[in-house]
Image (cartoon, grey):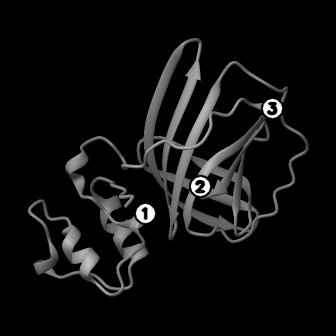
Amino acid sequence: MLRTACAGLVAAALLAGCSSSSGGADDAGADGAPSDAAVEASSDAPPAMCVDAGARFGATCNMLSLAGASITPTDLGAIAPRGGAIVDGEYLLTAFAVAGGATDVIYRQRLSICSGTLNVVKELKSGGATLVTTATSTFTLTGTQITLTPSCGSYWDGTSGYDATPTSFVIYGQGDHALTFTRE
């Protein structure tokens, strides 16, 4: 079962945003976070991707594991964001397009989206070096624009165009690149 974790206030926001009820003091674990038993025993328990594992993971923003194939960027065509409803779930990066075409950077990313919160684990490979990071952001949607506000780590800060269907999510960055994610 996939469990995501966020530190501090993000933990409270995740649970409040993903569950229709809040636990009482009896539901708290030793570190003040809801115990796994309390969340799993609830009849209205949030989806596994939304369950907080508490601040016990330190600086790690979430516990998502990398999955999917590494993606080499391709050439970016015309951008025409359409917006749409973003469906809660887990997504894998399936395409990455950059203005001007391929670069020497290879990407792999996995997202967990739940009630206005986006958790990500990302891997970037370039010149023999590999960097794996995690981040958590909250987001709001306005028309064809998504505004991401980082709450742990750094993923995407600011407003960008986006597309969403029941099975995919595309985010456009500053008119020069697009990341396409497919729902698992």
Residue 40, placed above or below residue 153? below
Amino acid tagged 2: Tyr
Closer to the camera, 153 or 72?
Answer: 72
Query: At x 38% / y 79%, what residue is drawn?
Result: 19
Instruction: Rate crowding at label 1 as few (under 14), some (14 to 19) or many (20 or more) other CA atoms within 10 Å.
Output: many
Question: Residue 106: x, y in percent?
Answer: 64, 27
Q: Secondary structure at mark 3?
A: strand
Query: Could you tell me if the residues under marks 1 and 3 are in contact, i.e. CB atoms within 8 Å?
Result: no
Question: Residue 9: x, y in percent?
Answer: 30, 60
Using residue 102 as the reference point, say whether residue 89 is left or right of it: left
Q: CA distance from mark 1 to mark 2?
A: 11 Å
Q: Quadrant of the N terminus?
A: bottom left
The quarter holding residue 10 reads bottom left
Residue 89, placed above or below residue 98? below
Residue 33, placed above or below residue 126? below
Residue 8, placed above or below residue 97? below
Which residue has dot 3 on it? 74
Instruction: Rate crowding at label 2 as few (under 14), some (14 to 19) or many (20 or more) other CA atoms within 10 Å.
Output: many
Q: Secondary structure at mark 1?
A: helix
- First in sequence, mark 3 or 2: give its number: 3
Amino acid tagged 1: Met
Which residue has dot 1 on it? 49
Which residue has dot 2 on it? 91
- First in sequence, mark 1 or 3: give its number: 1
Instruction: Rate crowding at label 3 as few (under 14), some (14 to 19) or many (20 or more) other CA atoms within 10 Å.
Output: some
Query: At x 42% / y 49%, what residue is drawn?
Result: 64
